[in-house]
């Protein structure tokens, strides 16, 4: 058995930040491309995901979470409603508002998208040796800590 020699190269935090940002952006873009055939846009999928994570939101709250203008969110929600992926219920305290939630069909679509993405990434990880997978496992833990900070 040969021992791998690891050379530690000191990289300034600003350079490491740039390298990580670039790698994460490219990986995220590639994972997003691994999706089942369908006509949901990335924006619609993002809004549906935000609703599942939040539980329920008003259209204005959803627009804020997604960082889009309310008229844009109105169009996104209309398309999701047409497909039966989002449902509306009256707001419990404000009769002028509605609450948006993913339907069972919406949650099923999200599950299908997540499975496709996980399968794509798992196939790429399976091509790596155990040492590289262990490094990525540790990196994932560190990235989670940074994200929670």
Image (cartoon, grey):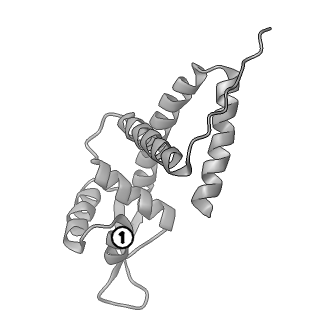
Q: Is residue 19 left or right of residue 143?
A: left
Q: Is residue 76 left or right of residue 31?
A: left
| Residue under the point 24% across and 71% down | 69
Image coords of residue 31 (percent x, y): 43, 37
State whether residue 61 is above or below residue 92.
Answer: above
| Residue under the point 40% across and 38% down | 26
Residue under pointer 1: 62
State whether residue 79 is above or below residue 69.
Answer: above
Quarter of the image containing the N terminus? Answer: top right
| Residue under the point 37% across and 55% down | 46
Quarter of the image containing the C terminus? Answer: bottom right
Choose top left, top right, bottom left or bottom right for residue 36.
top left
Q: Which of the two residues, 81 or 136, is positioned nearer the viewer here? A: 136
State whether residue 87 is above or below residue 118.
Answer: below
Q: Which of the two residues, 132 or 98, is positioned nearer the viewer here? A: 132
Judging from the image, what secondary structure is the residue with disc 1 in? Answer: helix
């Amino acid at each position: 058995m040969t021992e791998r020699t690891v050379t530690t190269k000191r990289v300034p935090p600003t350079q490491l930040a740039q390298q990580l940002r670039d790698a994460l952006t490219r990986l995220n873009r590639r994972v997003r491309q691994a999706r089942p055939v369908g006509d949901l846009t990335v924006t619609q999928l993002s809004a549906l995901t935000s609703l599942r994570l939040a539980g329920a939101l008003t259209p204005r709250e959803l627009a804020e979470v997604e960082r889009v203008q309310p008229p844009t969110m109105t169009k996104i929600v209309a398309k999701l409603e047409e497909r039966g992926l989002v449902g509306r219920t009256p707001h419990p305290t404000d009769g002028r508002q509605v609450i948006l939630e993913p339907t069972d069909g919406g949650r099923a679509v999200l599950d299908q998208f997540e499975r496709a993405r996980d399968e794509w990434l798992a196939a790429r990880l399976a091509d790596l040796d155990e040492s590289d997978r262990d490094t990525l496992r540790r990196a994932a833990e560190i990235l989670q800590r940074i994200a929670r900070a």
